Image (cartoon, rainbow, N blue to C red):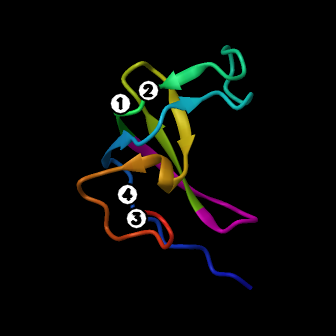
Amino acid sequence: MIEPRTPIYQWGQKVWAETDLFNDGTYPDREPGALLVAAGSEGEIVQVGFHEEAKIPVYLVEFPNGCVVGCLEEELRSDQARGQVAGIL
């Protein structure tokens, strides 16, 4: 059994979108493919969870435009990350 990977970001931590974040079809009231958050936008981690099958952390991030978006570690950056993610520069 694969153990869940330890999150590198924590609740309440300030982060920035590393890439443009687009609607994958699961965000309500926005067209699929619509830009939700531009790269470089600042947000705050409001919840940390796990993808059950992949055993990787998933972060709910609230951005100033009112979007709360589920993000993977490689989609975020922070000056205060607790560690590095294997395979991510």
Marks 2 and 4, the one that precedes in the sequence:
4
Report the span colored magenta. 45-56
The residue singled out by tag 3 in the image is: 8
Q: Quadrant of the N terminus?
A: bottom right
- Which three-letter amino acid code belongs to the residue tagged 3? Ile
Q: Nearer the viewer, mark 2 or mark 3?
A: 2
Q: Residue at x 54, y 35 (%)?
A: 69
Identify the residue position indicated by label 1 in the image. 41
Q: Nearer the viewer, mark 1 or mark 4?
A: 1
Disc 1 residue crowd, few under 14, some 14–19, many 20+, Cα 10 Å:
some
- Residue drawn at x 60%, y 74% as measured from the top left: 4
Q: Is residue 22 above or below residue 50?
A: above
The first of marks 3 and 1 along the sequence is: 3
What residue is disc 2 on?
A: 38
- Magenta span: predominant SS is strand
Q: Residue at x 70, y 66 (%)?
A: 54
In the picture, measured across the screen, residue 37 lies left or right of residue 30, that is: left
- On whether residue 66 falls in the magenta region, the answer is no
The reply to whether callout 1 and callout 4 are in contact (CB within 8 Å) is: no
Kindly report which numbered mark, 2 or 4, lies closer to the viewer in this rendering: 2
- Tag 4 residue: 10
Looking at numbered disc 4 in the image, what kind of residue is underneath it?
Gln
Distance (Cα) linking label 1 and label 4: 18 Å
Please tell me whether mark 2 sits on a helix, a strand or a loop: loop
Identify the mark at residue 29; answer none if there is no mark: none
Locate residue 22, reporting x and y percent: 60, 29
